[in-house]
Amino acid sequence: RWARAVSPLNIPLALPISAMPFASLNGATLWYDDWGPAEAEPLIFHHGYTGYRRSVGYFEGGAAWLLSHDLAPGAYRCIFVEARGCNDSRDAPGPYSIAQQALDVLTLADMLELHTFSFCGHSMGGGVGWQLLASHSDRIRRMVLLAPVPARGFPKSPGEMEGPRQHVLQHFGWLPKYTSEAAALERQRVVSEGRRGDTEEYLQDRARMLVSVPEEYWTEAWLSMRNLSLEAALPSISTPVLVIAGASDELLRANVEDSLRLGDGVLHVLSGAGHEVARDDPLGVARAMHGFFTGEALSPSAKRALVERRLRERGHGSVPDSKL
């Protein structure tokens, strides 16, 4: 049976309250949706900073849609949630930290009676993924991180973001907290890289997101990303993790370094993508994810374990790393 029969096709940015699925999670009312058979692989999607559900493919032709409707119909139960302060969860109160967002994901899973589940997070949602791996790895089957925020957070420079609150609100420099949707849209058009996903509809949606998020979210969520400090936990994480990075993303180096620190990490770099990997190459993301879930993509440690097992089964000894 289908957990929900709602199609992502032509869903507007905001639906009437009565037509929208909401969940009461930890004192907040958050938007969520649930596609696919209840018995399929549960996969929770989480967007990034100032993002929303379309950032991870909640529409026909998006990465999540291609994964669940095209590549493997019926194999995945795709569950989406919008974070406190964002889009249709914008009225939810804080805190807006990565730790709180991770707690909300776990509470949503509890509500859906999912003791274990897989998770896919983009950017700040990837930070939520790092948090889940560090503190609740027993509940995570597989982890997919799309251009995630570095596990070490963002480096500090002398005086950076240590001043008055107004300075914190200007943290991007080129991306202040907008109050005018027209100004936000103009800025989005200027900084657009001209990729396939940079449609006028997408740019308008991003402008709405930048204006609609509360100032408290703008500040607290950014500081939570900047102050993330989970790098030391990566080597002890045994959960299979797929890191999908964009070749022209400024976070590429950090994504590569984090993937190499993981005990069971797989790295996939998309040559035609920037930071918005799911938007820039939705089919590439969907294919990489499906290969990861079906065991076609193996980490070096998983490959070695497989080879060692096969050698033992045939009565052979182990081989040096250089031969693998």
Image: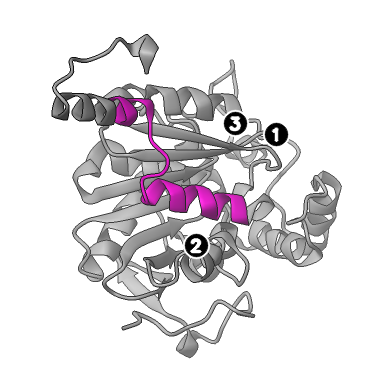
Name the disc covering residue 251, or none: 3
Q: Between marks 3 and 1, how big is the CA–CA gap?
A: 9 Å
> Can you identify the residue that label 1 sits on?
248
**Is residue 299 highlighted in magenta?**
yes
Which-is-in-front pick, marks 1 and 2?
A: 2
Q: Secondary structure at mark 3?
A: loop
Earlier in the chain: of badge 1 and badge 2, it is: 2
Is residue 300 shown above or below 295?
above
Q: Quadrant of residue 308?
A: top left
Earlier in the chain: of badge 3 and badge 2, it is: 2
Q: Secondary structure at mark 1?
A: loop
Discs 1, 2 touching: Cβ within 8 Å: no
Name the disc covering residue 67, or none: 2
Of the 4 image quadrants, the one containing the C terminus is top left
Q: Foreground residue, 270 or 111?
A: 270
The answer to whether residue 263 is seen in the rendering is no
What range of the chain is rendered magenta? 283-304
- In the picture as drawn, the residue positioned furthest to the front comes out as 314
Q: Amino acid at mark 2?
A: Leu
Picture coordinates of residue 101, whole percent (x, y) = 38, 52
Is residue 312 shown above or below 18?
above
